[in-house]
Amino acid sequence: MALEANDDASRRLSIVGVDPEPGFSGGETQVLALTLALNAAGHRAELICDPAGRLFERALAAGIRCHPLRIRNAIDLAAAMRLRTILRREHFDVVHFHTSRAHSMAPFVRDCASATVVTRRMDYRPNRLFAPFLFNRSVDRVIAISAGVADSLEAAGVDRNRIATIHSGVDCDRFCPPSIMQRDQARSSLGLGRDEIAVVAIGSLEARKGHRYLLEAAASLARTASKHAPAIRYFIAGDGSIRREIENQIAQLGCPKGITMLGRIDDPLTLLWASDIFMMPSLKEGLGVAALEAMSCGLPTIASAVGGLAELVEHDRTGVQVEPAHSDQLASAIARLAASPELRTRMGAAARIRVEQNYSMAAMAARTLALYRACLNQPRGEKKV
């Protein structure tokens, strides 16, 4: 699905995304890609973000105009006033708020643009007191990145008619299955032997990502492995508040040799090309950009049946679904996929097709642009509240 480009029937829009997060994770990947796609289609697309943040740095390097704004918390009134100043000066048609701290600014700038939109990426239920006010009255529409996120919004009192489900997307041209040479080079960079099975998990090191259960599964398999079982190595990429806790757990479980902590990585492509199995044992997950990227590279995925992951990973077709917080199920799924190259190949091919058909970056950008136009074409006085 291609974005419109200079369509005579559709005027050029002026759009700004607000994302004040200092780090760079799956959400920021989506924000940057959307902004680039909108600019490539002939629209004026800019960003408002933290001048010390990695999104600001990457966006500038990509040629995107950025407006510096630091938002300390949800009640940062000084930041709200600075945001109003930027919006009144720049005259944007659409303001798109991308994170929780950005959402909190929406009530203060309702009158500063023709349309305001927020994206909700988490599948846990938002505050029932604040959510109806913010999502039903302070913005024109809410984008949920999965049906699970949409359900959590509705459960918190948000009008379902105001919610549009637009899945996150991945660049399927870049995140593609590797050639034999690319795979060999990627595995060599990690010191992987020909017959070793590489299991990878990519994501922030936070309790909700479920690393604890992956480590318990790895320790269990190491204890019970027969001499004929394939050697399994685990690679954990990311950083966060529980890094030290994870390192301590690895030491306590007695399996440090088979687990490598890679820290934060800027580009996961080489790691994915070297891998055989992707893991996302999250306890909560809006959708999972890392899983999208892995599946686009042709990797079978073992994932918790939570949030958007329950929609993305088709059990026994594109990967294996497990109950959250069940290390025994994770261990069983790893052992099953590790033992069968044919199963990994079949599931990986199906995963690639599923992402191409349903989760491309181009489709995400086109659907988001269509939502912008729908908001602009409906007079604000007629919008549902």
Image (spheres, rainbow, N blue to C red):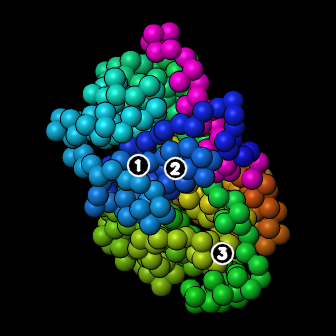
Marks 3 and 1: which is nearer the front? 1
10 Å crowding of disc 2: few (<14), some (14-19), many (20+)? many
Q: Is residue 216 left or right of residue 245?
A: right
Marks 3,1: beta carbons within 8 A: no
* SS class, disc 2: helix
Please give the name of the residue rendered at 57% of the width and 20% of the height, measured from the top-left corner: 377
| Percent x, y of residue 17 | 43, 43
- Toward the front, the furthest residue is 8
10 Å crowding of disc 1: few (<14), some (14-19), many (20+)? many
* SS class, disc 1: strand
Marks 3 and 2: which is nearer the front? 2
Extent of the magenta region: 356-385
Q: Quadrant of the N terminus?
A: top right
Is residue 212 on the magenta stretch? Answer: no
User: Which of pointers 3 and 1 lies earlier in the amino acid sequence?
Assistant: 1
- Toward the top, the furthest residue is 382
10 Å crowding of disc 3: few (<14), some (14-19), many (20+)? many
Please give the name of the residue rendered at 27% of the width and 34% of the height, measured from the top-left corner: 84
| Percent x, y of residue 318 | 74, 54
| Percent x, y of residue 134 | 36, 24
The residue that mark 2 highlights is 35
User: Which of pointers 3 and 2 lies earlier in the amino acid sequence?
Assistant: 2
